[in-house]
Image (cartoon, rainbow, N blue to C red):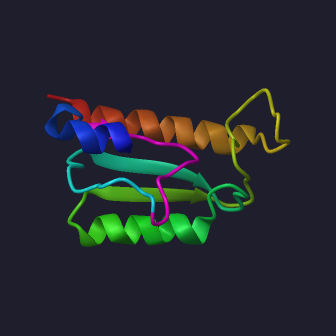
Amino acid sequence: FVIAAMEGDRVAAITPWYGAPLGDDAPDMSGLTAAVRGHFAADDGFFAADAVRVFETKLKDMGKNVSFVFHEGTGHAFGNEENGLGTYDADAKAAAWSDSIAFLKSQLSA
């Protein structure tokens, strides 16, 4: 998010997973021009889904092209096969990965 906002038109699309710049210390997102498809855990102890939904609404209210997917029954780092947090979910990872690739192809095809 931060690099895309800082680089403006140099970044066409992003697919962040898990984290988002939240709260009063969040950076200025006004320079974000990239299309965004984010993938987030519904039960994330680090980035609460409600706070991420507020962030999504804020971006949409700014006219940004964003769409966030919340994977039910998952926790932070659901796609990490090393499973350090005990939250790995192969099905959610596969769905997020497939969707991310399709989204990037749809946004970056010239």
In this image, 88 relative to 98: left or right? right
Q: Quadrant of the N terminus?
A: top left
Tell which of 32 and 35 is nearer to you: 32
Foreground residue, 36 or 58?
A: 58
Quadrant occupied by the C terminus: top left
Q: Return the x and y of residue 62 as percentages of the image width and height.
A: 23, 67
Image coords of residue 32 (percent x, y): 24, 49
Q: Position of residue 44 (x, y in %)?
A: 69, 57
Q: Which residues are magenta?
A: 13-24
Is residue 45 in view?
A: yes
Q: Residue 45 lies in what quarter of the image?
A: bottom right
Q: Main secondary structure of the magenta part?
A: loop
Q: Nearer the viewer, residue 57 or 67?
A: 57
Say which residue appears at 49% left-offset and 69% top-offset: 53
Q: Residue at x 25, y 40 (%)?
A: 6
Q: Is residue 22 magenta?
A: yes
Tell which residue pokes out farthest to the right in this image: 86
Displayed quadrant of residue 107? top left
Kindly identify the residue that appears in the image at 15 percent across and 38 percent down: 9
Q: Is 88 rendered above or below residue 64?
A: above
The single residue placed furthest to the front in the displayed view is 25
Left or right: residue 5 compared with residue 98: left
Q: Is residue 110 left or right of residue 18?
A: left
Q: Position of residue 67 (x, y in %)?
A: 38, 58
Residue 35 forms part of the magenta stretch: no
Asked if residue 12 shows in the view, the reply is no
